[in-house]
Image (cartoon, rainbow, N blue to C red):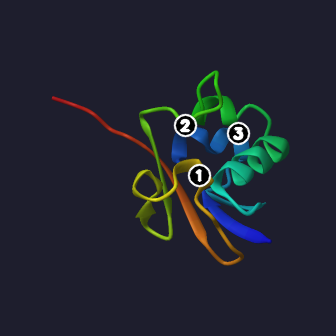
Amino acid sequence: MAVTVRIPTPLQRLTNGQAEVQCDGSTVSDLLFDLEKRYPGIKERICDEQGKLRRFVNVFVNEEDIRFMQGDQTAVKAGDEVSIIPAIAGG
């Protein structure tokens, strides 16, 4: 099941410069596993040592923040768009 995953610019060096990649899975967690299989090293930039999404990384499924859904267990289906967006802080 192909889901489009949008990759933030700082991580595109790990996806051979691609801003969007296709991944397979039925949940966001599955997509992250497939993303790591296809592009080794990317998951450690997105997840902590326990495999949980880092606090400063926001993930959206079809423009809906997964923090207000089922987190990394949020279901995805073919044709969905998942965006990985690093949080930006400043003062």
Q: Residue at x 74, y 31 (%)?
A: 41
Amino acid carrying mark 2 in the image: Leu
Label 3 to label 2, Cα distance in Å?
A: 18 Å
- Residue count near mark 3 (Cα–Cα under 10 Å), binned few <14, some 14–19, many ≥20: some
- The reply to whether discs 3 and 1 touch (Cβ–Cβ < 8 Å) is yes
Q: Which mark is residue 53?
A: 2
Q: Is residue 89 left or right of residue 76?
A: left
Q: Which comes before the other along the chain, label 1 or label 2?
A: 1
- Residue count near mark 1 (Cα–Cα under 10 Å), binned few <14, some 14–19, many ≥20: many
According to the picture, the residue beneath numbered tag 1 turns out to be 7
Q: Residue at x 43, y 51 (%)?
A: 67
Q: Residue at x 43, y 33 (%)?
A: 55
Q: Point out residue 59 in the picture as x, y percentages from the top left corner.
A: 49, 52
Q: Is residue 9 left or right of residue 21?
A: left
Q: Point out residue 25 in the picture as x, y percentages from the top left corner.
A: 76, 60
The answer to which image quadrant residue 42 occupies is top right
**Camera-nearest label, 1 or 2:** 2
Label 1 to label 2, Cα distance in Å?
A: 15 Å
Instruction: Work out which residue is located at the far bottom of the displayed protein and give it.
Output: 79
Q: Residue at x 60, y 31 (%)?
A: 45
According to the picture, the residue beneath numbered tag 3 turns out to be 14
